[in-house]
Image: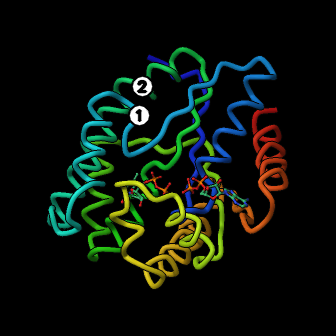
């Protein structure tokens, strides 16, 4: 099968505004008559949403770092098989709120130094990168404030605190510098509409 669609992911630390911007972009592209699938990770398919509950709720030491990596990868594989690939084959624009770069950062860097295992598992089981990754760069303190103000049961990684947010931010910026062909970095410390206008300009430029 040939993928005819286009795949864009949003990445960044918790509370950086990814979900907000992914929604804005989806609305804008739909209004322009494009076929859009807006989805998220962990989750996005029925099975992956079930795995989401396993990894994001409960005690932070519920899973070892290795088991957690396997669960996130299993969720991604299901999401890819059942939602992302079929949509791309159908010629849709897939907008995904987080994808494999989040695993590179959170499982590869945050809990333990598992980056080699993250990369090996990605090559073995996922083997796909987005056509474009939009990194919403954000002051870690403000991101954490925003993320915590949402409340709710899904607080595992947010609970790791400000030190982790800072390391994640730098990790994402390093990843973007390593892959300039795929990444665009956008300053998220501005009003929603200003950030959305930058995102739209980048996407329209790439889509032609
Ligand atoms: P993420 O998906 O990156 O965790 P969200 O889009 O859920 O971030 O945003 C986190 C919180 O911050 C939400 O309450 C949202 O309304 C708010 N928010 C998002 N973008 C901005 C912005 N540019 N300025 C101020 N608040 C924002
Ligand atoms: P998300 O719902 O996007 O959180 P937020 O809106 O706060 O950014 O993602 C939930 C959490 O899952 C987030 O803390 C990052 C974490 N995560 C991983 O640890 N590994 C992964 O592969 C993914 C996709 C997310």
Q: In this rendering, would 166 be left or right of 51? A: right
Of callouts 1 and 2, the N-terminal one: 1
User: Residue 17, percent across and down?
Assistant: 63, 56
Q: In this rendering, would 122 be left or right of 207? A: left
In the picture shown, does residue 132 fall above or below 162? above
Residue 83, numbered circle: 2
Question: Total marks drawn?
Answer: 2
- Residue tagged by mark 1? 44
Q: Residue at x 53, y 23 (%)?
A: 88
User: Residue 99, percent across and down?
Assistant: 46, 48
For the N terminus, the quadrant is: top left
In which of the image's four quarters is ligand 1 placed?
bottom right
In the picture shown, does residue 49 fall above or below 42? above
In the picture shown, does residue 85 fall above or below 149? above
Q: Secondary structure at mark 2?
A: helix
- Do the residues bearing badges 1 and 2 touch, measured as CB atoms within 8 Å? yes
Q: In this rendering, would 75 be left or right of 31? A: left
For the C terminus, the quadrant is: top right
Q: Based on the displayed image, in which of its 4 quarters is residue 128 positioned?
A: top left
Cα–Cα span, label 1 and label 2: 7 Å
Residue 91, numbered circle: none
Q: Residue at x 72, y 30 (%)?
A: 27
């Amino acid at each position: 099968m040939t993928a005819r669609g286009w795949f864009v992911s949003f990445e960044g630390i918790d509370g950086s505004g990814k979900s907000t911007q992914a929604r804005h972009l989806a609305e804008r592209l739909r209004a322009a008559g494009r076929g859009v699938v807006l989805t998220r990770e962990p989750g996005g398919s029925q099975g992956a949403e079930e795995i989401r509950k396993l990894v994001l709720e409960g005690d932070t030491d519920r899973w070892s770092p290795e088991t957690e990596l396997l669960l996130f990868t299993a969720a991604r594989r299901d999401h890819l098989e059942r939602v992302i690939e079929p949509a791309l084959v159908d010629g849709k624009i897939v907008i995904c709120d987080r994808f494999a770069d989040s695993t590179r950062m959170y499982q590869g860097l945050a809990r333990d130094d598992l980056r080699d295992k993250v990369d090996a598992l990605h090559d073995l089981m996922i083997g796909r990168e987005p056509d474009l990754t939009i990194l919403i760069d954000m002051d870690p303190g403000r991101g954490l404030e925003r993320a915590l103000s949402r409340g709710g049961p899904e607080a595992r990684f947010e609970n790791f605190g400000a030190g982790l947010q800072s390391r994640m931010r730098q990790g994402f910026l390093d990843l973007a510098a390593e892959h300039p062909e795929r990444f665009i970095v956008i300053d998220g410390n501005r009003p929603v509409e200003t950030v959305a206008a930058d995102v739209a300009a980048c996407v329209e430029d790439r889509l032609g």
